[in-house]
Image (cartoon, coloured by chain):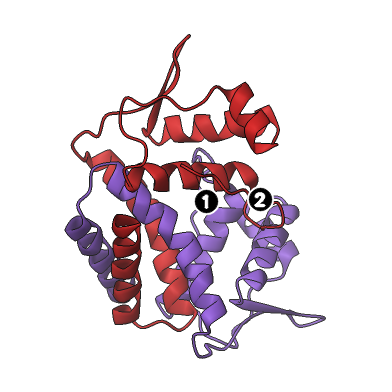
Chain colours: A red, B purple
Amino acid sequence: MIIRIETESDIPIYTQLTNQIIEGIARGEIVPGDSLPSVRSFAADLGVNMHTVNKSYHELEKKGIINIVPKSGAIIAPTNKMTEEKKQQIVTELKPVVAEALVLGMSQEEVQGLVSSILEDIKMS
Amino acid sequence: MIIRIETESDIPIYTQLTNQIIEGIARGEIVPGDSLPSVRSFAADLGVNMHTVNKSYHELEKKGIINIVPKSGAIIAPTNKMTEEKKQQIVTELKPVVAEALVLGMSQEEVQGLVSSILEDIKMS
C-alpha cells in the first residue's frame, strides 16, 4: 500500500493517513490480521511526526478498524458483522457530507450516482 | 432551526455546529440570503466559546456554504450550479466514509441503502 501525504492539503496529516489506511483495507491491499508498521518506523518512512502516526492509530482503533496489541503493535481487526452501533457511526459521518452535497447543488440522484462511482472506484482499484 | 450541542460527543463542537447548520440548509429551514446570528450572540445562545462559532463560520465559508460579508455578517450563499471543484470536495469527504463502511462489514448495497435513507431523512424532516 502506498501512502501519499499532501502537506499542502487542508486535511490534517493524521486524517489523511487514517483515510488512506481505511481505503487500503477496503481495496484488500491489507487484510485482517496484517500488522501496520510500528509508529516509529512508519513516521520515519512518511517523514511525519510520531505523534501524527499515533493519533491516526488511535483513531483507527476507536473506529474498530485496528486493534492495538501490546508488543504486537497495530493489527487490522477482523471484519465482524455490522452492529447497530457501527451503523450509527457511519450515519453520523455520512449525513453531514450528504447534506453538504445537497446544499452545494447536487440532486438526490447525483448523490447516489457519486456514491456508486466511489464504490466502483474502491472495488476496482 | 434548533441547534443541539453535545458536549460529551467525540465530535468537536465547531464541527457539530457546522454540520447542523448544513443540515438545516439541506432541510430548507434556512435558505440562501438568510443571515446567521452574529458570532457573539450565537456563542452566548449556545453557551460555547466565540472562537468555536468563528471556526465553524470560517469552515462554512471555505466550503462555499456561507459568505462572510463585512458589517452584514454570515449570509447563506445562493445555491449555484455544481462545479467540478465542489464535486471533488464532496468526493474527498465521501470516499473515506464509504471505505470505512465497507471495512466495517457493510455490503455495497447496504451503503447505497444507507445513503438513500439519509437522503429521505433529510428531505422529510
Of the image marks 1 and 2, the number of the one nearer the N terminus: 1
Q: Position of residue B14 (x, y in %)?
A: 61, 54
Q: Quadrant of residue A24?
A: top left
Give me the C-alpha separation between circle 1 and circle 2.
9 Å
Q: Is residue B83 above or below residue A53?
A: below
Q: Position of residue B40 (x, y in %)?
A: 75, 63
Which is more toward the observer, A89 or B90?
B90
Chain of the residue on which disc 1 is drawn: B
Image check: A6 left or right of A24?
right
Determine the residue positioned at 50% across, 35% down. Answer: A59
Q: Is residue B3 above or below residue A68?
A: below
Q: Are marks 1 and 2 on the same chain?
A: yes
Determine the residue positioned at 32% across, 28% down. Answer: A77
Furthest-right residue in view? B71
Query: Would you name the residue on which mark 2 appears?
Result: B48
Packing grade of label 2 (10 A; few <14, some 14-19, many >=20) is some
| Callout count | 2
**Which label is found at residue B5?**
1
Determine the residue positioned at 42% across, 59% down. Answer: B95
Q: Do the residues labelled 1 and 2 touch (CB within 8 Å)?
A: yes
**Which label is found at residue A124?**
none
Residue type for callout 2: Val
Chain of the residue on which disc 2 is drawn: B
Residue A23 seen from this side: yes
| Secondary structure under the numbered disc 2 in the rendered image | loop
